[in-house]
Image: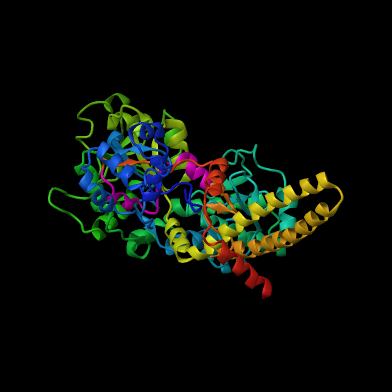
Amino acid sequence: RTPTFPAISCLLTLSSLRSYTSSLNSSFFKKNSPLKSKNYFWNGFRRNYLLTSMGVEKSRSDQTLRLVPKHLTSEKDVFCNRELNMKQIEAIGFDMDYTLAQYYSSFELLAFEGAKNKLVNMLGYPKEILTFPYNSCNFTRGLVIDIKRGNIIKMDRHKYVRVAFHGNKELSSKERKKIYHASFMHTSLNNDKNFVNMDTLFSVVDSVLFAHLIDFKDSNPEKIPQPYDLLFNEMRYCVNMCHNDGVIKDRVAEEPEKFIMPDHEILPMLRRLKSEGKKTFLLTNSLWDYTSVVMNFLYKEGGGRIKGESSWLDLFDVIIVGSCKPNFILQSNSALFRVNTATNTLTNVIDEEVSMDHFLNESKVFQGGNWTHLHKIMKLSSGDRLLYVGDHMYSDILRSKRSLGWRTCLIVPELENEIKTHKDHKGMRKYVNELRARQYDLDEYTDQLRLQILREENGAKAEHLNKELDTRMVELNFIKRTLSEEGKKFHKMFHTYWGQLFKSGYQDSLFSQQVSSYACLYTSKASNLVSMSCSRSFRPAPDLSVFDQLLDNSERVVEDLRLLRDRIEQQKTV
């Protein structure tokens, strides 16, 4: 397991193969081989013995190992949290917005500007609001908005608040701990109305506008007398209105190329899934008129029609628009309507019709409905035979996993920047990790010195121990200061204010925990699935507890310890 993400790519590397073989029944080798070396896999004889026992000719065993390339993590990897055999998947479904279709920041700007205008012209907010800039780089996904206090916070997996902003102003450590000192361990953030999770990239619009409103309210309380929570709800109402009244979607329909990113791998990916016998479906909250605009653009930019296809509709067995997720997943009594794509009109569907073989002959585009309709139409034997690909942590991933047992794949576009930054600054990451390891060793060593001093009480040995303790405490305090400075520098390389998406301090972030718990797979783009076959078996990295990691570290020889000490000494001199 890497320190970056809750899982690594399931491709087998030589190091993971070594771990695998060390977990095999060693008594088998002791009984069947005369060699007693602990490191039997890397011993030439045992390596050949293992491969020949697997049916590989002894003369070709070395060549066989060389022919297996070592996997290098890339921005297009599909990461695995839970074992998944694609052969067992009967249907693969996709969300559209921020999943199949990725948007430029100009798309979010439409919502931002539209919401400002509605706040001023519909709800009577001060005209100064119209001057607010859209500084989307100030916030990121995975944060939590505390609407009662006007704060935006980042938590670790224990729900401890590590970073907090009031509006656009960062709270000091003292201010933050005064407000959030108590743990959120017993608070369900999905059910508490005072906290709003930023579950999708589009949530950045909410955080940017809310932060500006908080700053303006604090400076001009007489102009915005509303409490923070009412301020957020009115702002959120205006953003939603932009989706419903055409402020966003009409502009996208006029010039889709200005707002939608083309992706030339989407069509090959969908075509290959169908060619390998998988059922595919589109499940989106967008209505038919907007869905057709976006999908027609992706289809045209992706190369368009090929032999045997009449339109993008041929890429899916079923299309369900206006699904109203998460209610589509949570409820089983919502009515299903058939969409006439020519006239954009709806006709009611009788539930009994859904199970009939000829049900899709008339049309395969529907609106509304619920999960029972989808399962019947797709003729699924169970929910775990379905893989759903989406970007919204709650509506697409968490709820479908908890309620229906769907297998899930989360789209995390931010992964590209996370992986690139780790690669570009791997020396810095290694240095920070070595400092952490040294700090751990010194903490333990100084504690043992204290215990020895207590036992000795007086005498020359006690004096020597006290001197040693003083020396080591100086080193420990220096490492703590250095680690604090270097750790902050490293985290800011990912995001100036919020650091790594998957980390909060040195703990996994709340977002990282949610990804680990509810996303079977995750990747930066839906089209990355083009690199897998439908016979692929995804396997996660072994779960490592703190106990496991410390055991591994205790057996590890730190080759760069001398370099670390030299670097610390240089910093002391400076």
Residue 210, how many percent across, how many down?
Answer: 60, 57
Q: Which one is in front, 295 or 452?
A: 452
- The segment highlighted magenta reads 512-533
Furthest toward the front, the residue is: 34
Q: Quadrant of residue 495?
A: bottom right
- Residue at the image position 48 percent from the left and 47 percent from the top: 6
Whether residue 352 sits left or right of residue 419 in the image: it is left
Q: Is 516 part of what is drawn in magenta?
A: yes
Q: Residue furthest top?
A: 352
Q: Which residue occupies 19% across, 30% down?
A: 358
- Image quarter hosting the C terminus: bottom right
- Image-quadrant location for residue 564: bottom right
- Looking at the image, residue 291 sits to the left or right of residue 235; the answer is left
Q: Position of residue 318 (x, y in %)?
A: 27, 39
Q: Is residue 44 left or right of residue 404?
A: left
State whether residue 269 appears in this view: yes
| Magenta stretch: includes residue 544 | no
Rendered location of residue 322, percent (x, y): 38, 42
Q: Residue at x 70, y 62 (%)?
A: 475
Foreground residue among 544 and 448: 448
